[in-house]
Image (cartoon, rainbow, N blue to C red):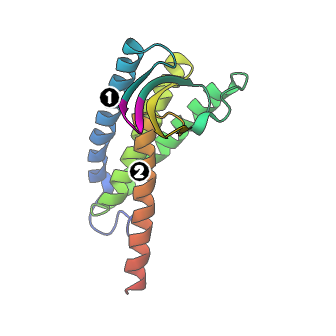
Amino acid sequence: MGAISGKQGGTGMIQLRWLALSAALVGFDQWTKQLVERGLQMYEARYVLPVFNIVRAHNRGAAFSMFDQASGWQRWAFSVLAAVVSAALVVWLARLERRANLMAAALALILAGAIGNVIDRLRLGYVIDFLQVHWQEHYFPAFNVADSAITVGAGLLLLDALLASRRSAGR
């Protein structure tokens, strides 16, 4: 309860400083996608490591290209969903107490990822993915910096919940 209450530890408005992290990550995400757009043709891959390539791919759907072949509704549905989630994340961030830094970092990362991908959806109609991990002939779906921010943010949310439950159990 203390992580979302503005009463313990001072006003939560201080947590809005984490928006600078979100802005920096959105900028980095968009910059890397522009590099890929300029430097690679569609599906062209550049070898980096035995388990990692840079490849240009377009995703009109959700995670792992789910709904990629849908009729076009997904562009607007996912854009509206990302806008609503982003607004909720900013409100949640503003309400966090001062000491809830792990939660704030998690929310800032998820916010950055949502915004980074929605910019692509609105600007292009698809998300540019380019990071490709594989083992031999087994390929993980391509992803991008925004997807990575969302994944790390979700992991930090889980870690925060685990640490909070341990603190509660120790009382």
Identify the magenta region.
48-53
Numbered disc 2: secondary structure: helix
Quarter of the image with the N terminus is bottom left
Q: Residue furthest bottom?
A: 171
* Residue found at x 27% / y 67%: 9
65 left or right of 51?
right
* Residue found at x 45% / y 39%: 133
Q: Quadrant of residue 169?
A: bottom left
Q: State whether the magenta stretch is mostly helix, strand or loop.
A: strand
145 left or right of 16?
right
Whether 129 is among the magenta residues is no
Give how far across and how far down residue 18 sits, in percent: 29, 46
Q: Which residue is mark 2?
A: 153
Q: Which residue is mark 1?
A: 27
Q: Badge 2 local density, few (<14 within 10 Å), some, or many (20+)?
A: many
* Residue found at x 52% / y 43%: 85
Q: Quadrant of residue 53?
A: top left
153 left or right of 102?
right
Q: Badge 1 local density, few (<14 within 10 Å), some, or many (20+)?
A: some
Circle 1: residue type? Gly
- Residue 76 visible in rendering: yes
Q: Quadrant of residue 168?
A: bottom left
